[in-house]
Amino acid sequence: MTSVTDLERIAAVGWPGTEYQRLGGWLLRAGGGFTGRANSVLPLGSPGIGLTDGIDMVRRFYGDRALPARFQVPWQAAECGRLDTVLEGLGWIAGDEAAVLVADLAGMLAHCTGRADLPPVQLADAPSPEWLAGYRYRGNDLPPSAVAVLTAGDGPVFVTLLEGGERLGVARGIVTDGWLGVTAVTVEPAHRRRGVATALMAGLGLWGVERGARDVYLQVAAENETAFALYDGLGFVEHHRYHYRTEPFG
């Protein structure tokens, strides 16, 4: 099985933010504040300096960009345990726990039977205004910095499902090292329980297979029981979890 460290590196390439800086094995990322992953440190190894000095550099990096200093901490990565303990001792706040789910892509597609009454998905290499209007990040409208983050990375695809001119749902995909990364899956409330999410996943899966993907990963907020049930039905299993540690204000 792909290690936690390797899968997090792949996911970081698939959702890279708009700028980054390396500090040894730490990847400092910024993206105008849009999403935790694009605006946090991914600590996959030693920073090459003492932890205290490394944390101070993180504070300066995010302070220069008027962003809160934040780490994304994958629990099962051996190199992250001590760092998480140190950050906790400094009063950094843990939150926004998420699970990383994985599946064999062929197996996922076998579960995506879809529904005959849904039209084919539409794919584009850039998010249209229609797509952007359909993506609700944590239930909120997208900030101005969102488009730059969404279009970063090597060749993402933006999937829209329309029916009679009405938007049913949207999603984003990207392929990195044989892995299809799925993000931004959003179904319009009026069209839930119609198989829209499954149709979006099927469209992304077929696109990924054409580009050499063999496996698929995605992230789900720990409290999102509906999403866990959906992806369990598509053959996903939990690979690991992470949370964020954010420096408190004041």
Image (spheres, helix red, strand yellow):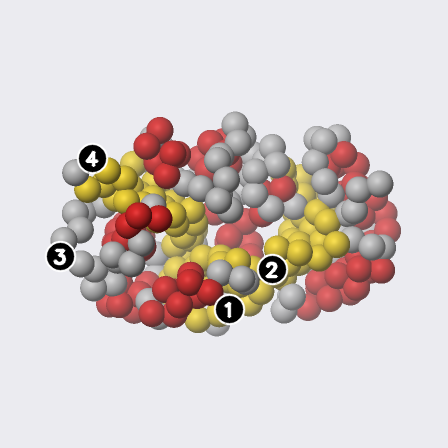
In this image, 118 relative to 195: left or right?
A: left
Give the Cα separation between the discs numbered 1 and 2: 14 Å
The residue that disc 3 covers is: 116
The quarter holding residue 168 reads: top left
Number of numbered callouts drawn: 4
Lateral position of residue 26 relative to residue 239, left or right:
right
- Res 153 seen here: no
Amino acid type, residue under disc 4 in the picture: Gly
Name the residue: 58% across, 47% down. 37
Question: Mark 1 or mark 3, which has the lower sequence index?
Answer: 3
Residue at left offset 35%, top offset 29% = 129
Q: Residue furthest left?
A: 116
Tell me which label, 2 or 4, sits earlier in the chain: 2
Q: Where is mark 2, residue-wise? A: 97
Indicate which label's residue lies in the foreground, 4 or 1: 4
| Image mark for residue 165 | 4
